[in-house]
Image: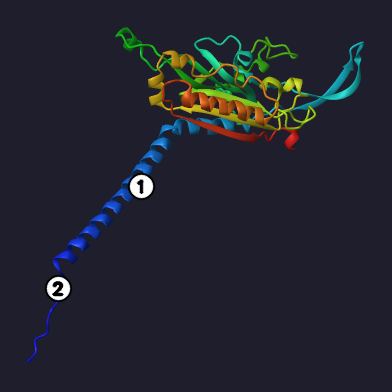
Amino acid sequence: MMRRSRHGFSLIELLLSMAVLSIMLVILGQVITNSTNAWSLGRGKITRYQEARQAFETIQQRLSQATLATYWDYEYDPSAPTIPTAYAPRSSLIFRCGEAPSVLTGLAGGDLTGHAIVFTAALGRDTSPEHGRFRALLNLCGFYVSHGPDESVPVKGKQAGLKDVKRFRLFEFCQPANELPLFATTSTPTSPWTGLVGVDHARPLAENIILLVLAPVNNGVQANPNDIAPGYSYDAAAYNHELPAELRIIMVAMDEASAIRIGEGPAEKNLLPTGLFKNAASPADIDRDLRTLQDHLNTGLGVQVAYQIFDTVIPLPASRWNS
């Protein structure tokens, strides 16, 4: 009777199998680790700039509701003020943007950076109880960035020795309809916005927003319809009381860790290079300044800065150029 021989794994085969299995487990573990790190990094980045992202969406939403309620009225001959000579567009409302110090005059409590905007929108906000049923009341709105004291530090904390540091903030203001200068008894019909400060009812919308840039398209008033308004300055009263067709919005945010690293040293004073976003004739000029700013934040401060740039172009639905 013949016996069948049974062949098992040799010691060498077992060792090779274990080696191959170990290599596969190491590779799989590395893949899982890399995936986890990438997920954590992405989640951290989303969370880090979540407030800035929400603020950027708020700016777009508010500006999409901007209105001037333009109407047509008579133009008169200066030499004969009772004789109409032509029809011309008119508006009693406001849309004004440009460098923040020129748009918001007399602002106290911080240093303005970048651009600011003031506009009217039918948001329906009012502090009078009798107006509660009106949902389309006009409000004076706006946005600006200020570098000023950290108002979140309580008074008792300051008395205990907590340092009153400065912070960059994006502010939003929305003046109730019953407080609009347009409807005030002291306003004159011809210039209700004279001396406008426009920062009543201001509130911080987001922390660590270091720059806001607003570039209105020139509505074809100049030769090139894509020209940016000179000096980024746009006052609807100087453009036939019309809103710009489009508005490019750029917002630069840094994270809290970068804000702490910068502190109040030389890096804070040099955070934003001078001379940028002062004038532009085309989108290419804006992109050039934006690249210069990125290079400066990446290598020009001597301090690591983590930042994110939000950049979009929105149409203004109430503009005649979009109708």
- Specify the farthest residue to the front: 12
At a point 52% along the width and 27% down the height, the residue shown is 294
Q: How crowded is mark 1: few (under 14 residues within 10 Å), some or many (20 or more)?
A: few
- x then y, percent, for residue 173: 55, 21
Q: Which residue in the structure is indicated by mark 2? A: 8
Which amino acid type is marked by label 1?
Ser
The quadrant holding residue 180 is top right
Residue 138 appears in the picture as rendered: no
Please give the label number shown on residue 257.
none
Residues 13 and 171: in front is: 13
Residues 64 and 245: in front is: 245
- x then y, percent, for residue 73: 83, 23
At a point 43% along the width and 20% down the height, the residue shown is 302
Which amino acid type is marked by label 2?
Gly
Residues 258 and 12: in front is: 12
Residue 56 appears in the picture as rendered: yes
Q: Which residue in the structure is indicated by mark 1? A: 35
Q: In which quarter of the image is the N terminus?
A: bottom left
At a point 68% along the width and 14% down the height, the residue shown is 193
Q: What element carries label 2?
A: loop
- x then y, percent, for residue 65: 63, 32
- Specify the farthest residue to the left: 1
- Specify the farthest residue to the top: 159
In the displayed structure image, the side of residue 251 where residue 165 appears, left or right = left
At a point 29% along the width and 9% down the height, the residue shown is 160
- x then y, percent, for residue 284: 66, 31
Q: Is mark 1 on a helix, strand or loop?
A: helix
Q: Is residue 282 above or below residue 233?
A: below
